[in-house]
Image (cartoon, rainbow, N blue to C red):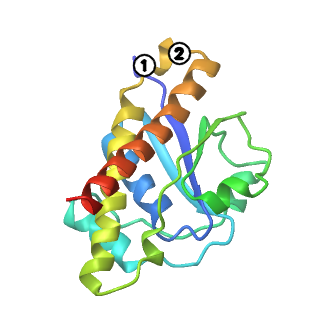
Amino acid sequence: MSERRFNVLFLCTSNSARSIIAEALLNFWGKERFQAFSAGSRPKGEVHPLALDVLRRNRIPAETARSKSVDEFARRDARPLDFVLTVCDNAAREPCPLWRGQPITAHWSVHDPAAAEGTLEERARAFSKVFRELDARLKLFIGLRLDMLGEVALKRKLDAIGQLAKSVNKRQDHHMVHS
């Protein structure tokens, strides 16, 4: 008997980088237990080339990546969602539609690599940093015993994953400044 697959939606404003990377990573690492999607409240309509590049460099399939609207997932006939995770602060502040399936929601603040400035190498490093951060968070998420946790405990765990990564980044940034 196969285990239930959970539907996860990653939300970001433009759906061109962070949410696309998260979708690809969860579909790769969690393919047996999760079906991931991404969307934006104001989708750019195209995936950032450096997001595709970081996925390819890390051998994460990205052929089907596309920038899409949250409206696709808010329709009456949309598949029910189990989790909705916002990965940008703007999307977290926007009103969300009523989701089918009454999903558990959490916010994982992730710096926008598309806003990075500098040389191509510096901008690519920003995408690599976001890739590593989301990869670490999603591996923690995948490791959760979803069948053993109630909704309140699961919400707390998801919030903790978001906060844990933030505190690790602050320590890394502090170390880089003082070394």
Q: Is residue 66 above or below residue 102?
A: below
In this rendering, the answer to whether 156 lies above or below 115 is above
Number of the label disc, if any, that sits on residue 76 = none
Residue at the extreme top of the image, as rendered: 148
Residue with the mark numbered 1? 145
Seen at 46% across and 36% down, the residue is 161
Relative to residue 162, is residue 125 drawn left or right?
Answer: left
Label count reads 2
Q: Which mark is residue 149?
A: 2
Residue with the most extreme bottom position: 119
Q: Residue at x 57, y 59 (%)?
A: 88
Q: Amino acid at mark 1?
A: Arg
Which x, y percent locates residue 104?
64, 33
User: What residue is rendered at 49% in x and 39% in y?
Assistant: 163
Q: How many residues crowd around disc 1 within 10 Å: few (fewer than 14), some, or many (20 or more)?
A: few
Residue in the foreground of this view, choosing between 154 and 32 = 154
Q: Position of residue 133 (x, y in %)?
A: 35, 51
Query: What is the secondary structure assignment of the residue under circle 2?
Result: loop
Q: The C terminus is located in which quarter?
A: bottom left
From the viewer's perspective, is 99 left or right of 175?
Answer: right
Q: Position of residue 164 (x, y in %)?
A: 43, 37
Outermost front residue:
178
Measure how far apart labels 1 and 2 are at the Cα level.
Answer: 7 Å
Q: Quadrant of the N terminus?
A: top left
Secondary structure under badge 1?
loop
Looking at the picture, does residue 94 appear above or below residue 102?
A: below
Q: Position of residue 103 (x, y in %)?
A: 66, 35
The answer to whether residue 30 is seen in the rendering is: no
Asked if the residue at tag 2 contacts the one at tag 1, i.e. Cβ–Cβ closer than 8 Å, the answer is yes
Q: Nearer the viewer, residue 93 or 27?
A: 93
Identity of the amino acid at label 2?
Leu
